[in-house]
Image (cartoon, grey):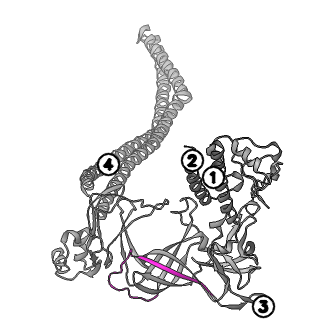
Amino acid sequence: MKAKLLVVFLLVAFGAAGWGWYYYNDSNKPVASRYGTETVVNEAFMVAISEQGELAAVKSIKISSEMEGSSTIVYVVGEGEMVNGSTTVKAETGDTPASIARKHGVKEEDLRHVNPKLDEAIKNQETINIPGDLLVELDPEDLNRRINTQDIDVQKARDAVVRAEGEMRTTLLETQLTLKKAENALQNAELDLEKAQKSTVETYIQDMQGQIENFKKDIELSEKNVRAYDSLKELGFVSEVEVLREKAKAAKTAHNMKIALADLEAYKKYDQVKLISEKKLAVDEATVNVEKTKVANESEMNDANSSVATAKKTLELEIEKLDDLKDQLAKSRIYAPADGMVVYHVAESRYGSSSSSMIEKGASIRKGQDILRLPDVSKMKVELKIHESKRWQVELGNKVAVYVGEHKFKGEVKMLKDVADSTSRWTGNKKVFRCEVVIENEQLPEGIRVGSTATCQIFVANLPKEYTDENGKEVKTLKVPIQSVIGVKGNKKVVFTIDDKGKPQPTIVETGLYDQTHIQIKGGKLKEGDVILKAPLLYAKEINVGGDMFDYRKISPEDLGLEVPVYDPTTDLEGAQAQAGGTRPSGGGTRPSGGGTRPSGGGTRPSGGGGNSADAFKAPTELKLTSEQQQKWEGVAEFSKAAFDAAME
């Protein structure tokens, strides 16, 4: 019984191994018999690349917020609505704000909103702006509150100017009076000096000299009286006392004259100099006081003028703030500058998504943010983004077929950026270049509007079947499927041609222009009629696309210094029995470890190894089965194992 079971086990194990070996050898069949191929053709090649974009107007008016800071939308016109733009008219005699508003079908409030000096303009018969349809209104509540506060500040500033001007006039009068007093004091001092020099001193000296002369005459008279009294005494007419009295009077007069002479001398030497010096000093002081008064007055006037100038400048600034607020209030209502259809603005961030909030009532808008567009739909274009791999093929002036739904239009590349789009340059490795295709003089049918999706077929070249190159050589235009060309190390490109034995062989080629399906072969050994693999990367493992071609190489048993044993089932039954029993024969060499190359010749011995019966149904690692082959092997092995288990029972 045991011998019977052993035979069944061996039959099942060899059956599974044999089926796997058959499937493994099936992978060595010629690739051409199992995979898709393509024949290299020589024919004209119209090279065109397709890109999808969005319809836009060539000319478009952007409507953006000019209000400072952030504001809230309280009204916005509906997207897609047609609006009327602004106009201008000249005021005529008899016009009033109400009549002009009524005549042109606008509100007087809106008319005044865009004409701050409306009454003056009507009076002078000047040009008046008639606003277009209201597009957007931003919340003016905060501005109205700030304008009221600013009105108060302006009035305070006006009062400050009046007060400063009054103080300046008062200061002017006070400084003028002070200067007159100082100048009068100087004049008085100068007169005192002149009086002292020309009157006081001379008068005093003359007075003293007159007194001295009088004293001299008195002395002479006294001397004569003394002599007379002496004679009369001798005659007995007067007494001795009378004579002594006359002598005393003469002596007193002589003394007074002596004192007067001394005083006159002292006056001339001291008092006269002192008096003149004092009067001169008073003049100098008065002169300095006049100059000081002038300087002080100038300083006070400068302060007063500065106060007036500061008050006026403050008033100007306050008025400017008020005007700015009123201007901001005017900017809170945005009117259509021209006729057109309303399109909401949608900004794109550098990461490819919308970077702005929705345009709707209640949305927050910041200064400079685009809100709407009024496109001129009479001339349309398609906005594209060309991938960097295709950018080198596209040139200005390339003709384009534009498809919008079922409609087709003619177009031309009119704009092509040389720098990658800043909104997309940071999205991974994807870099795109902005491109614009203008539709040539086409009136778009109804239903096709700005923002519609358009597909553009850009014709970058029309290669004839045969042409003469720059060296004068006749060249055939060869084209192959784009997926049949793969890049390898050294910045080279190859295709896999099928040789006479039906095996694929890499052939280096030089490529040129390409579109979504085909690529031009400009050089290399490829020629018309050659058969190539259509998509070699789908079968990379089978045709060994890898190894040195891609800077890496599979490991073979020889790289590990191993000897690959050759298994012959007709002569090595004992080895098979030993393997089934779990013992590897020692003379059979060493089983190569994972990663070895495919065996040549009769094939290597499967390495089912181990005493576990389940291991006998595993695919040997030396077979290097593909995923698909491994799945088929496991399916058969599972069936064989089930049969073996049933036999053992």
Please say whether residue 129 is visible from this viewpoint: no
> What residue span does the magenta drawing correspond to?
440-462
Front residue of 136/443: it is: 443
Taking 13 as reference, is 512 above or below it?
below
| Nearer the camera: disc 3 or disc 1 | 1
Inter-mark Cα distance, 2 to 4: 123 Å
Front residue of 26/100: it is: 26
For label 1, the residue is 12
Check disc 4 and report its element: helix, strand or loop.
Answer: helix
For label 2, the residue is 647
For label 3, the residue is 472
For label 4, the residue is 164
Residue drawn 81% across the image and 47% down it: 588
Check disc 1 and report its element: helix, strand or loop.
Answer: helix
Inter-mark Cα distance, 1 to 4: 119 Å
| Residues at discs 2 and 1 in contact (Cβ within 8 Å) | yes
| Residues at discs 1 and 4 in contact (Cβ within 8 Å) | no
Determine crowd level at label 1: few under 14, some 14-19, many 20+ residues with C-alpha closer than 10 A. Answer: many
Q: Amino acid at mark 3?
A: Gly
| Residues at discs 4 and 3 in contact (Cβ within 8 Å) | no
Check disc 3 and report its element: helix, strand or loop.
Answer: loop
